[in-house]
Amino acid sequence: MSESIEPKAYNPRAVEAHWQSLWAARGTNNVDLDGAENPFYALMMFPYPSAEGLHVGNLFAFTGSDISARFHRLMGHQVFQPLGYDAFGIHSENYALKIGAHPMELTPKNVANFQRQLERAGLMIDWRSKVDTSRPDYYKWTQWVFLQLYQQGLAYKKAAAVNWCPTDKTVLANEQVENGLCERCGTAVEQRVLEQWFFRISAYAERLLGNLDVLDWSSITKQAQRNWIGRSEGAELVFRVAASDTSVRVFTTRADTIYGATYLVLAPEHPLVAAVTSDAQRSSVQAYQEATRKQDLIARKSSREKTGVFTGAFAVNPATGADIPVWIADYVLMEYGTGAIMAVPGHDERDFEFARVFQLPIVRVVAAPGDDASTPLGDAAYTDDIGGHLVNSGVFEGLSVSDAKSRVTAWLAEHGHATAVVNYRLHDWCISRQRYWGPPIPIIYCDHCGTVPVPVSQLPVELPFIPDFKPDDSGISPLARHEEWYRVPCPTCGAMARRETDVSDTFLDSAWYFLRYPSATRHDVPFDATRTKAWLPVDSYIGGNEHAVLHLLYSRFITMVLKDAGHIDFEEPFTRFRAHGMIIREGAKMSKSKGNVINPDAYMEEWGADAFRMYLMFLGPYEEGGDFRDQGISGVKRFLDRLWSSVRDAASDGAPDPAVMRQLHRTIRKVGEDTANLAYNTAIAAMMEYINHVRRGDRVPHRAEVLPLVQLAAPFAPHLAEECWATLGGTSSVFDSGWPAFDAALLVEDEVDLVVQVNGKVRGKVRVAVDIAQDDALTKALADAAIAKFVTTPVKKVIFVPKRLLNIVVG
RNA sequence: GCGGACGUGGCGAAAUUGGUAGACGCGCCAGCCUUAGGAGCUGGUAGGGUAACCUGUCCCGGUUCGAGUCCGGGCGUUCGCACCA
C-alpha cells in the first residue's frame, strides 16, 4: 500500500471562489443600516474606473482599509464598508476621445471590469450601497448640492482665466498642464477669460483651518491643508496717489517696514492701472499688460526674472510723506491680497531684485542686533523678522520688529491709513468645466428672470447622449452646440430660456459621496436623516495623500455648508483619516511608459487573493508604502500554507504546550495593537514568528494553539481564515466570532535576561528573577567570568534598569 | 525659496520611544528527506579576525553610564506648495 502524501499547500483558487460565493449567498458582508447598535463606518477613497483596470495602488489602499474594517468587525462593531465609482471627469472623457469611444458607453464597461476585479480581491464590501457618480440617480443629488450652495449665496458666477489648448481645442485643468504645455499634445497653453461658477470656500477658511487642530488625521495631511489655506496676518495700508483723488490699498505682513517703502507695485491687471497711468507711459503700460496676458500661467510662475513698467504715477508714503513711484509688474499677483504691494527692497527679496533691475532706492529700516542704520545691506535684503530692531523709522526708531508691527499699524489706523486684516491663500473653488462628461450645472438663464436655479422637482438635469462630445474652438461646452437640449422654458415665467451648458468639476461629485452611501438605495432624498445620524460622520477614512488638499478640503467645506443649511448636524465628515503610502517599483512610480505596472489579476491568479493582499501589506509600513518585488510573495504564501496545514493537522486531545500558549498570548496582544495602528507589516511578522513556534520541526499543533491565530489572520487572509474556521468546526463566519482576548496573566514572566554592560558595552547577559535587587544582580553578573574579566578597575557607578539592563561603570 | 517625510545587511524592513541593532520575510550557503523537486524540514547568514575580540545604523561634532533614537552643523533622497507680499 502506498502512502499518499498530503500536500501542505492549499488551493487558493478553489478556497477563494468557494467563500466568495458563500459570502454573497449569506450576505456576510452586508450590514443592517437601520438596526445597527454599534455602527462603524469604514470608508476607502473610491476609484476612478480607468480602462486599464484596477491598479496595485488601488488594491494596496483598499486592502489596508479592508483589514481595518474587518478588524473592527471582529472587535464587535457592525461595520459598513461601501465602495463605488468616481466615474465622471475629464480623465474618462479624454481617454474616450483618445480611443474613439463614447464615455457613456465606455464607462459602464470599465465599471464592470473594476467590479469583477474588486470582487476577486475579496473585500468586505456591502455592494448594495454602491454608487456611480456618472449615473442620474447619483448626480441628481450632486446638482441638489449645487443648489444648496446657490441658495446660501455661496455659488456665484464671474469671469476668470482658464487654460486653453489651441490644438486640442479644449479647456484644461491645471493638473493637465505640464510646464506650460498641454500634457496630451505638447502645445503651449494659452489663457482665456470665461464666465465661470465659483464656490465661496474662502468664506470658510478660518473654520477649515481651526478645526484641523482637533481632527484625528495624519499630521502630514493636516499640514498640507494648513499650507494650502495659507493664513497670514497683516494689515491693509492705504496709499494716496499724488495729484489725484484715488488711493491704492496694499496688503503687507510687514507694516513695521513702512519707512522703507520706496515704491508701489500693482498687478498688471489691477483695475486702477488705467486710472493712474500717465499719458506719457500709457503705451508702454498697455504693451506690458498685453504681454503678461498672453503669457501662460505656468511659464509666468516658473520665470523668476523681474520685469515691470513705471506707470508715471506717484503715491505718498503715509509715514515719510515722500512721493514714491507706482509700477506694474507681474511678480505681484492679482489673486492674492489686494493685488498691490508696497515695495520694501531693503527687507524683501523680490522687491530687492526688482529695485536692482530698475535702480530704485533701497533703504534699510531694520537692523540686526548689533547693527545700526549705517550698516550696509550688502547683496541681499535683510528679511529676518524676529531679532531685528527699527532704524531710519522716525518715532518708531529702536522698536523690535514684532512691537513695531502692531504699533505702526495702530498709528496708521488712527490716521485712516491702515486696517489689520487676515489674508488667505485659499481661493474660491472654480467648479465650471467647459466639457461634456460631468453633471450639468442646474441653472437656467432667462431674459426676464435672470439666473434661475432649476427647481429640485425638475432634477436631475440629465446629461444627454451626444455623439460629438469633443470640445471645439469656441471655448464653450459641447452641450452648447445642442439647442434642442439647452433651449428650455424658464421655470419661473415660462418664457424660452437657456440652460447653463457647463458641467461641474469631478471634485464636486466626490465632495459628498460619503453622505450618499448609507442612503444609496433611497431615491427620494439625497440622504436619509435617520441613517445619516446613525452612521456619520465617517469613523475611519483611509486614502491617498495626493487628495490631502483638494478632495479632503472640498469634502469638509461641503459638509460645513450642509450643516449650516440644517441638513446634517456635524461639520467634519471624517473623524479619523489616515494617509497610506504609495507602492513603487524599482524605486520609481509605476507607469505604463516605464512598463513597470503590476497587473493584480495575474498575481491573484497565481498566488491567490489572500497571499497577494497579505504580501502588499507585508512590503513595508502601510502609511509609507513600499517597493514591489515579485519574489517576496512566496514567503507570505509559505506562511498561509503553514497556517492551513497546522489547522488541518491540529490535535484536539491532550493539552497545548504552555510555552507555545505564552507565545500565543503575546502574539494576540501584538497583532491587536499593530492592526489598530495600521502597522500591518509588523502584525504579519508577529504571526509568522508565532507559526514558527507552532509548527517547529513539523510538530503537531494543538487546536487551542491555532484557533485564535485563525481569528488574528482573518482580516489579512479572509478566505483562508474562513476555510480554517470551518475546518475547526465553526458554523458561522469567522468575522462574527470576535477578536480573541489575551490573558495578561500569561504574559507575566518570573525571569528575564538582564543585559550586562561594562562601560556601556554589552559583555553578557544573566538570567534573573524579574524583581531582583540591584546588588543581587550585580553579584550575579560579576560571578560570570566573561563579564568579570572586564571589571579590572574599581566600580565607580552602577546603572540598573529593572527587567532590562545592568551597566557597570568602572574607572 | 517655504513646508513635510526619510537615510539601518546583498534586498524589503524591525527596534518596547534613550537600554542586547538587524525581529519577520526575500535571497544566498550547508545539511536532512527524496527516483526527482521551483516541495517540506533543520541550521547558518552585518563586516573583519583562527580566536579572545574589534568595527558597524549617510558624514562631522555634542549631550549621556549608555545614542539608530535627543541636540547642532553638513550631505543625499523624496513628496507637497511655490514671486502669497
Image (tube, grey):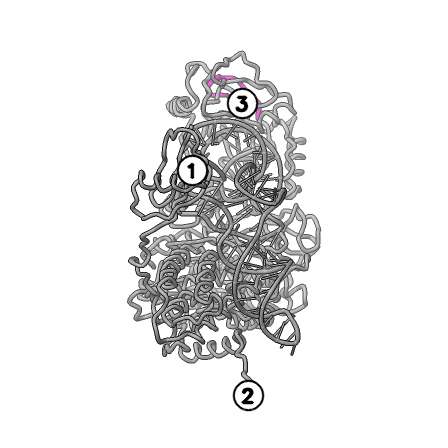
**Quarter of the image where one finds residue B55:** top right
Q: Earlier in the sequence, mark 3 or mark 2?
A: 2
Which residue is identified by label 3? Answer: A382
Q: Look at label 3 and name its amino acid.
A: Tyr
Q: Tell me the tag on residue A788.
A: 1
- Nearest the viewer among A705 and A544 is A705
Residue at 53% across / 32% down in the picture?
A340
Expressed as whole percent of the image width and height from the top left, the position of residue A380 reads 59, 23
Expressed as whole percent of the image width and height from the top left, the position of residue A119 reads 50, 72
- Nearest the viewer among A524 and A581 is A581
Residue A714 lies, with reference to residue A595, above or below; the image says below
Locate residue A72 relative to residue A290 in the image: left or right. left
Subunit under mark 3: A
Image marks 1 and 3: residues in contact by CB distance under 8 Å: no
Q: Nearer the viewer, mark 1 or mark 3?
A: 1
Q: CA distance from mark 1 to mark 2?
A: 63 Å
